[in-house]
Amino acid sequence: MAEQIPYGVVASLIDRLASAAFREFGRIYDVMDQLKRLTKTIESVRAVLLDAEEKEQQNHAVQIWIRRLKDDVLHPVDDLLDKFVIEDMRHKMNENPKKKVTQICPS
């Protein structure tokens, strides 16, 4: 059975790319087509991971491929999306300092 961690990361990436924050980012920076292509690519990876579940126990090459995919692709992309979300939050907080205070100390 394929490791659930890579599949979980893939599902998380797809959810994040479909989020309102990423759609807004895509519109603002005119990169919607690139985000859609990235989402399709990640969906393809998810499909391959499902197929790999059946082969992982019998094929060490599949085990190695899954490990490399997780370490070299999925986690770095996940980290990059984390950085984007953090930077977006910082930008929004700096944009509206009054909102920042009310979020910290709600009335």
Image (cartoon, grey):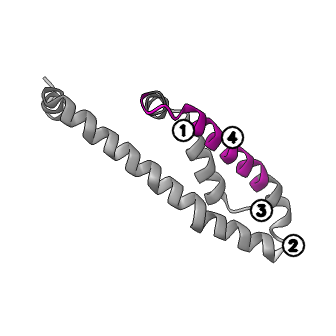
Q: Residue furthest bottom?
A: 60
Q: Earlier in the sequence, mark 1 or mark 4?
A: 1
Specify the quadrant of the image occupied by residue 64: bottom right
Q: Nearer the viewer, residue 50 or 32?
A: 32
Q: Residue at x 49, y 32 (%)?
A: 26
Q: Earlier in the sequence, mark 4 or mark 2?
A: 4
Give the foreground label among 3 and 4: 4
Q: Earlier in the sequence, mark 3 or mark 2?
A: 3
Q: Which residues are magenta?
A: 28-49
The three-letter amino acid code for the residue at tag 1 is Leu
Q: SS of the residue at dot 3?
A: loop
Q: Which mark is residue 17?
A: 1
Tally the marks. 4
The three-letter amino acid code for the residue at tag 4 is Lys
**CA separation in Å, label 3 and label 1:** 26 Å
Q: Which residue is mark 2?
A: 58
The three-letter amino acid code for the residue at tag 3 is Met
Whether residues under marks 4 and 2 lie with C-beta atoms below 8 angstroms apart, the answer is no
Q: Earlier in the sequence, mark 3 or mark 1?
A: 3
Where is residue 13 drawn, in percent x and y? Answer: 56, 46
**CA separation in Å, label 3 and label 2:** 10 Å
The three-letter amino acid code for the residue at tag 2 is Gln
Q: Which residue is mark 4?
A: 40
Q: Earlier in the sequence, mark 3 or mark 4?
A: 3
**CA separation in Å, label 4 and label 2:** 28 Å
Q: Nearer the viewer, residue 44 or 34?
A: 34
Q: Which mark is residue 91?
A: none
Where is residue 40 drawn, in percent x and y? Answer: 69, 40
Q: Which residue is mark 3?
A: 1
Q: Is residue 48 left or right of residue 5?
A: right
Where is residue 78 drawn, in percent x and y? Answer: 50, 53
